[in-house]
Image: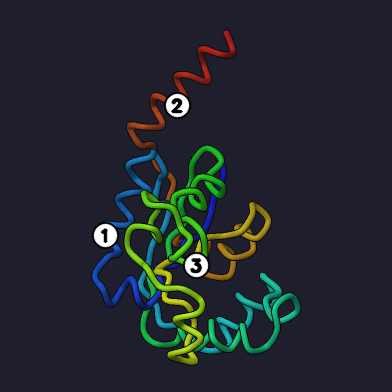
């Protein structure tokens, strides 16, 4: 089983969409291992965006600044999800970073409809695209360790896992 981090950004929290979006992850069989509402400071976001994701190195200080400023607009909800190929599954459900290009049926495609052009013309803030999702399994491990203590993550069995594990047992026979 693979783990991934999602962060409901301030725009998702402020719009009251956390529960509705979270249920989409649960409905596909992902298990919530930990979840909390937090209001991190600039240093926390700098570590997340640069030390882990290398956003300044890859895309420049302005892109980092816009992302950090958008995240500092309010509290966020961070969650660790677990499931079969969880990172790829979550990224598929979330959709493209730019909501305008995200397909209908994805989280961003269904709940956010702004474009880079619109945001660039009207504000200095980041893209209000509701949610962050880890980019790959290695990034997910680093992000989870940054956002959660081991004591904040819980292990339990869901009814969905019962069927997934049953399938795995049948394959071994």
Residue linked to disc 2: 164
Residues under labels 3 and 2: Cα distance?
Answer: 33 Å
Characterize the local packing of mark 1: few (<14), some (14-19) or many (20 or more) Cα atoms within 10 angstroms: few
Residues under labels 3 and 1: Cα distance?
Answer: 22 Å
Q: Is residue 15 left or right of residue 70?
A: left
The percent coordinates of residue 39 (x first, y second) are 41, 82
| In the depicted structure, whether residue 125 falls above or below residue 150 | below
Q: Residue at x 68, y 56 (%)?
A: 138
Residues under labels 2 and 1: Cα distance?
Answer: 25 Å
Q: Is residue 145 left or right of residue 24?
A: right
Which mark sits nearer the N-terminus, 3 or 1?
1
Characterize the local packing of mark 2: few (<14), some (14-19) or many (20 or more) Cα atoms within 10 angstroms: some
Q: Residue at x 40, y 45 (%)?
A: 31
Color theme of the render: rainbow
Displayed quadrant of residue 94: bottom left
Q: Is residue 130 left or right of residue 20?
A: right
For residue 166, the mark is none
| In the depicted structure, whether residue 99 falls above or below residue 59 | above
Q: Disc 3 vs disc 2: which is toward the camera?
A: 3
Is 20 in front, or is 112? 112
Residue linked to disc 3: 98
Is 95 in front, or is 27? 95
The percent coordinates of residue 27 (x first, y second) are 32, 41
Characterize the local packing of mark 3: few (<14), some (14-19) or many (20 or more) Cα atoms within 10 angstroms: some
Q: Residue at x 38, y 48 (%)?
A: 25
| In the depicted structure, whether residue 111 falls above or below residue 122 | above
Secondary structure of residue under mark 2? helix
Residue linked to disc 1: 19
């Amino acid at each position: 089983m693979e783990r991934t981090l999602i962060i409901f950004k301030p725009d998702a929290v402020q719009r009251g969409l956390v529960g509705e979006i979270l249920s989409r992850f649960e409905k596909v069989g992902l298990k919530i291992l930990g979840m909390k509402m937090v209001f991190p400071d600039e240093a926390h976001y700098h570590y997340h965006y640069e030390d882990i994701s290398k956003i300044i190195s890859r895309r420049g200080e302005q892109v980092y600044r816009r992302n950090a400023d958008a995240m500092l607009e309010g509290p966020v909800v961070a969650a660790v999800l677990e499931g079969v190929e969880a990172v790829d599954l979550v990224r598929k459900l979330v959709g493209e970073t730019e909501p305008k290009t995200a397909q209908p049926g994805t989280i961003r495609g269904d709940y956010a409809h702004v474009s880079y052009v619109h945001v660039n013309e009207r504000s200095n803030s980041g893209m209000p695209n509701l949610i962050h999702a880890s980019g790959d399994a290695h990034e997910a491990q680093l992000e989870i360790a940054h956002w959660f203590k081991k004591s904040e993550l819980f292990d339990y069995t869901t009814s969905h896992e019962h069927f997934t594990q049953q399938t795995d047992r049948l394959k071994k026979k």
